[in-house]
Image (tube, helix red, strand yellow):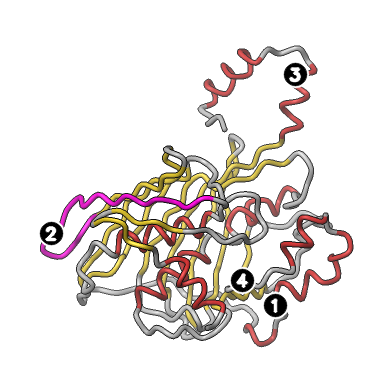
Amino acid sequence: MSKVDDLLALIRMERLEENLFRGESKHIGSPSVFGGQVLAQALSAAAQTVDPARLPHSLHGYFILAGDISSPIIYQVERSRDGGSFSTRRVTAIQHGKSIFHAAVSFQRIEEGYTHQNLMPDVPKPEELEGVFQEYVSYFDKLPEFFRKAFLLERPIDFRPTVAINPFAPDDSYPPERYVWIRANGKLSSDELLDHQLVLAYASDFNLLATAMLPHKLAIAQSGLQLASLDHAMWFHRPFRADEWLLYALDSPSASGARGFCRGSLFDMDGQLVASVAQEGLMRDRKRGESREARGESREQRAESREARGERRD
């Protein structure tokens, strides 16, 4: 079984009841459950309650709490509506009696219609580029032990960025845009479009928030930096295979209020736009909060300031 089939087995979950499913987690180097895994599992749970002739075309999710990687996640599906062409589902991921993720998913029967799309960016082809983990080899000895262990893990997705940037200690600021070729690390044994959508949903959570960090010379391993996905939206436009190269064209139009907003367009090798993604993530400098404490501001004063700016407390 290939690494990507192992991933697919992780995403396909155990059915406990008609609308209740249980999923396990796999460690990818982060201290909590990877958001892309929760996203894909929620999509999988919703799909198991829908007519197979209807495929997901949009997903909107909110990450509420960090997931415990050592415990199963329960997914509860609400069958909101089954219409003539569309089906809508709401999914709640539960762990230790608390909701950690909410999602709304819409499914549609396949039909023809008007079509147009943006053009695919002109970038180097994946065979001309090194894999992202080959690029990290030169940084390996400088990484904290936690990241070195994560680096050595087998991964189901292959990434090939068009521009190599040290993600642990950027040497400069960059425009908030990036292009990364992605592909499942192995051939999927399934030809079902839904399975390829599940794998892409998993992979879509990589590289987004990192794009918003580029102009600020921020690093994943930087001390005092708090990063977290807050929400995630995804739209599936056209059929594709997740085990063939897809160009992930990413940009971040805005960062403000300790949040970075990011977008992504996914193109296949023929230039077809197959999916779109949007996400907002937390980008918090903890040192700023510490400096405000040093200036004598109380916790209540800081909370009032956050509320006045409309920031979410985490």
- Tell which tag, 4 or 3, sits nearer the viewer: 3
In magenta stretch: residue 75: yes
Q: Secondary structure at mark 4?
A: strand
Front position in the image: 28 or 97: 97
The type of residue carrying mark 3 is: Glu
Distance Cα–Cα, label 1 vs label 4? 10 Å
Front position in the image: 241 or 51: 51
Q: Secondary structure at mark 2?
A: loop
Distance Cα–Cα, label 4 vs label 3? 40 Å
The type of residue carrying mark 1 is: Gly
Distance Cα–Cα, label 1 vs label 3? 43 Å
User: Which quadrant of the rendered structure holds the C terminus?
Assistant: top right
Q: Earlier in the sequence, mark 1 or mark 3?
A: 1
Distance Cα–Cα, label 2 vs label 4? 38 Å
In magenta stretch: residue 100: no
Front position in the image: 68 or 162: 68
Is disc 3 surrounded by few (<14), some (14 to 19) or many (20+) residues within 10 Å?
A: few
Residue topped by disc 3:
293
Q: Quadrant of residue 206?
A: bottom right
Segment colored magenta: 71-88
The type of residue carrying mark 2 is: Gly
What is the x, y in percent for residue 7?
51, 71
Q: Earlier in the sequence, mark 2 or mark 4?
A: 2
What is the x, y in percent for residue 200?
47, 69
